[in-house]
Image (cartoon, rainbow, N blue to C red):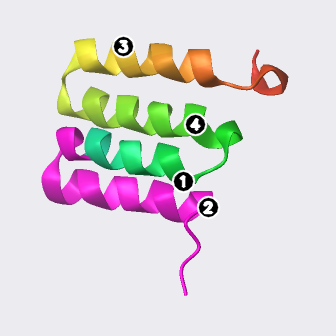
Amino acid sequence: KTCLKYGPLWFMLLRLVEKAYGARAVKEYAGFALKNICHELHWKVHFEVAAAFGRGGNLPECHGSIGNAALSCPKHLRW
C-alpha cells in the first residue's frame, strides 16, 4: 500500500536523490512530488530544489527555485 500524499517521505526522497544523482534529478523528482502532495507543501518542494542547486553551486537555478518557493507559499506561512 502506498501513500503518495505523505510529505515527509517526498522530502526524504529528494535528499536521497540529490546524494545519488545530483540536483538536476532532484528537480525532476520534484515534479512528481508537486503532482502528489498537498498545495500547502509546494513551497517546501521548491525550497528543497533550491537547496540542492545551492549546495551544487548552481546559483541561477537556486535563485529561480527560491522565487518559485516564495510565489507558492501559502499566505498564512508568509513572513
Upstream in sequence: badge 4 or badge 2: 2
Q: Nearer the viewer, residue 59 or 25?
A: 25
Amino acid type, label 3: His
Secondary-structure class at tag 1: helix
Q: Nearer the viewer, residue 20 or 6?
A: 6
Residue drawn at (32%, 50%) of the image: 29
Q: Nearer the viewer, residue 30 or 48?
A: 30
Amino acid type, label 1: Asn
Quick one: which residue is furthest to the front in this view? 35
Q: Which residue is mark 2?
A: 5
The residues bearing labels 2 and 3 have C-alpha atoms spaced at a distance of: 27 Å
Magenta region, residue range: 1-25
The residues bearing labels 4 and 2 have C-alpha atoms spaced at a distance of: 12 Å
Quick one: which residue is furthest to the bottom in this view? 1
Q: Nearer the viewer, mark 2 or mark 3?
A: 2
Find out whether the residues at labels 1 and 2 contact each other: C-beta distance under 8 Å. yes
Tell me if 17 is positioned left or right of 66 in this view: left
What is the x, y in percent for residue 49? 37, 35
Q: Is residue 21 magenta?
A: yes
Q: Quadrant of the C terminus?
A: top right
Q: Which residue is mark 3?
A: 63
Q: Which mark is residue 54?
A: none
What is the x, y in percent for residue 39? 66, 39
Amino acid type, label 2: Lys
Tell me the crowding category of disc 4: few under 14, some 14 to 19, or many 20 or more residues within 10 angstroms, Cα based. Answer: many
What is the x, y in percent for residue 61? 26, 19
Specify the principal SS of the magenta part: helix
Q: Is residue 23 magenta?
A: yes
Tell me the crowding category of disc 3: few under 14, some 14 to 19, or many 20 or more residues within 10 angstroms, Cα based. Answer: some
